[in-house]
């Protein structure tokens, strides 16, 4: 399998920079085996079956983009310079891995000031930048919420700066467990009215946690995609979630992750026979065509970047040729792409 096998032409104008309002008014491309039809997310209660179970990621996106100042000495005296930092993930030693711009001017041990309450020492420059903040716990969370901005994906951030609207728009309505630096974007289409309608239609919900990392936006750089190494992300499937999934499977219901993050987590946690087990730890599962599915029956997901690992994942579920048909239809009919874009419901023919 070559990287070019997962490429397609995407007009720049189809990249969404704002979400649909209300959330559930986004368009929904339903691909049920060989059938393709156009709908809206608010149609889900009529499309899904009673007894289906949606798997939802309850991670909470932190405002991980920070603007700070660093002070360096010069012949003319102290010089203050601006620096932009994006937090990646917390480390076991209490530091945060991060990206910085410009990073090359940072020095080990120097301090970057983000606000009167929040500053960080450069703890390491080997490999990835690591920062040690001056406060922790609830004080850190409060200072970060006051100083930080939502870490919009590069294809949005390159078009506009994050603003206050993104603090709501780039967060699911059930976001609970802080730790992600990217949103589980398929879940952004759900609002309270849709949840109520789905519940009334006999659709069940299970919450799992996968803290989405910035590595989700890293490009694939190898031509032979089978040699690509996935980034690791921390996730947890609690015992209650495992029991709910197993009960639904036993009753003949379908397991439908909302988003590739929830899908990757439950496929990591499931046994070969599909039995769901409690799980806590890192997952670096890489799903591409030929993957042996364990527990996923269908998938609700947004439209993904050309040549991305997520294009490979949906191709593993639906078949590469079928995915190319789906995406050609989406482009031709003006679906909006990527994190703030429209959604698809992918149901393979085997279901």
Image: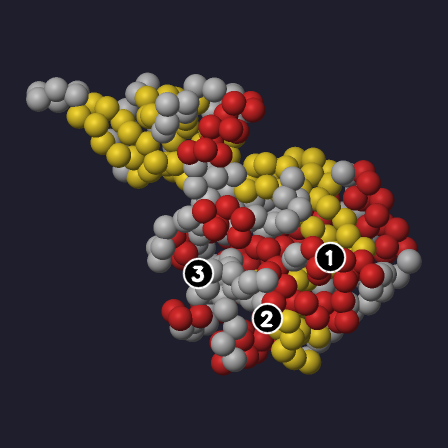
Q: Do the residues labelled 3 and 2 touch (CB within 8 Å)?
A: no
Work out whether mark 3 precedes mark 1 in sequence or the reverse, and give the earlier one: 3
The location of residue 116, given as percent across then percent down, is 37, 23
Q: Which residue carries the number 1 mark?
A: 195
Residue 219, numbered circle: none
Secondary structure state at the residue bearing disc 3:
loop
Looking at the image, residue 238 lies above or below residue 245: above
Q: Quadrant of the C terminus?
A: bottom right
Q: Which residue carries the number 2 mark?
A: 27
Looking at the image, residue 214 lies above or below residue 123: below
Residue pictured at 86% horizontal, 55% vertical = 248
Residue pictured at 73% horizontal, 38% vertical = 279
Work out whether mark 2 precedes mark 1 in sequence or the reverse, and give the earlier one: 2
Q: Is residue 34 left or right of residue 142?
A: right
Task: Give the CA distance from mark 3 to mark 2.
Answer: 15 Å
Residue pictured at 65% horizontal, 57% vertical = 190
Q: Is residue 105 left or right of residue 97?
A: left
Mark 2 closeness class: few <14, some 14–19, many ≥20 residues within 10 Å: many
The location of residue 4, given as percent across then percent down, is 45, 67
Task: Give the CA distance from mark 3 to mark 1.
Answer: 25 Å
Mark 1 closeness class: few <14, some 14–19, many ≥20 residues within 10 Å: some
Q: Along the line of sight, which residue is nearer the eye, 183 or 298?
A: 183
The location of residue 272, given as percent across then percent down, is 78, 50
Q: Which residue carries the number 3 mark?
A: 17
Work out whether mark 3 precedes mark 2 in sequence or the reverse, and give the earlier one: 3
2 or 1: mark nearer the eye? 1
Task: Give the CA distance from mark 2 to mark 1.
Answer: 17 Å
Secondary structure state at the residue bearing disc 2:
strand
Q: Along the line of sight, which residue is nearer the eye, 184 or 293?
A: 184
Q: Quadrant of residue 257?
A: bottom right
Residue pictured at 40% horizontal, 57% vertical = 155
């Amino acid at each position: 399998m070559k990287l070019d096998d997962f490429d397609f032409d995407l007009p720049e104008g189809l990249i969404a920079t704002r979400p649909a309002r209300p959330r559930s008014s986004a368009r929904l491309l339903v691909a049920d085996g060989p059938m393709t039809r156009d709908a809206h997310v608010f149609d889900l209660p009529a499309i899904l079956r009673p007894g289906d179970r949606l798997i939802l990621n309850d991670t909470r996106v932190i405002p991980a983009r920070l603007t700070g100042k660093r002070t360096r000495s010069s012949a003319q005296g102290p010089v203050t310079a601006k620096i932009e930092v994006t937090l990646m993930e917390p480390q076991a030693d209490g530091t945060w891995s991060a990206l910085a711009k410009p990073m090359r001017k940072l020095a080990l041990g120097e301090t970057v000031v983000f606000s009167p309450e929040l500053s960080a020492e450069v703890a390491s420059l080997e490999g990835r930048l690591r920062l040690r903040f001056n406060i922790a716990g609830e004080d850190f969370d409060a200072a970060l919420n006051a100083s930080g901005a939502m870490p919009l994906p590069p294809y949005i951030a390159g078009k506009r700066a994050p603003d206050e609207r993104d603090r709501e728009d780039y967060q699911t309505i059930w976001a609970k467990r802080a730790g992600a630096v990217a949103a589980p974007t398929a879940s952004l289409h759900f609002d309270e009215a849709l949840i109520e309608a789905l519940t009334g239609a006999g659709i069940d919900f299970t919450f799992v946690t996968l803290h989405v990392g910035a590595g989700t936006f890293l490009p694939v750089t190898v031509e032979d995609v089978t040699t690509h190494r996935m980034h690791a992300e921390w996730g947890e499937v609690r015992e209650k979630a495992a029991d709910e999934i197993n009960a639904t499977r036993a009753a003949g219901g379908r397991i439908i992750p909302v988003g590739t993050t929830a899908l990757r987590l439950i496929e990591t946690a499931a046994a070969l026979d599909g039995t769901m087990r409690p799980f806590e730890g890192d997952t670096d599962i890489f799903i591409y065509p030929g993957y042996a599915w364990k527990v996923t029956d269908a998938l609700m997901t947004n439209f993904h970047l050309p040549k991305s690992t997520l294009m490979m994942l949906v191709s593993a579920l639906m078949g590469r040729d079928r995915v190319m048909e789906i995406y050609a239809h989406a482009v031709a009919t003006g679906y909006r792409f990527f994190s703030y874009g429209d959604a698809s419901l992918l149901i393979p023919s085997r279901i």
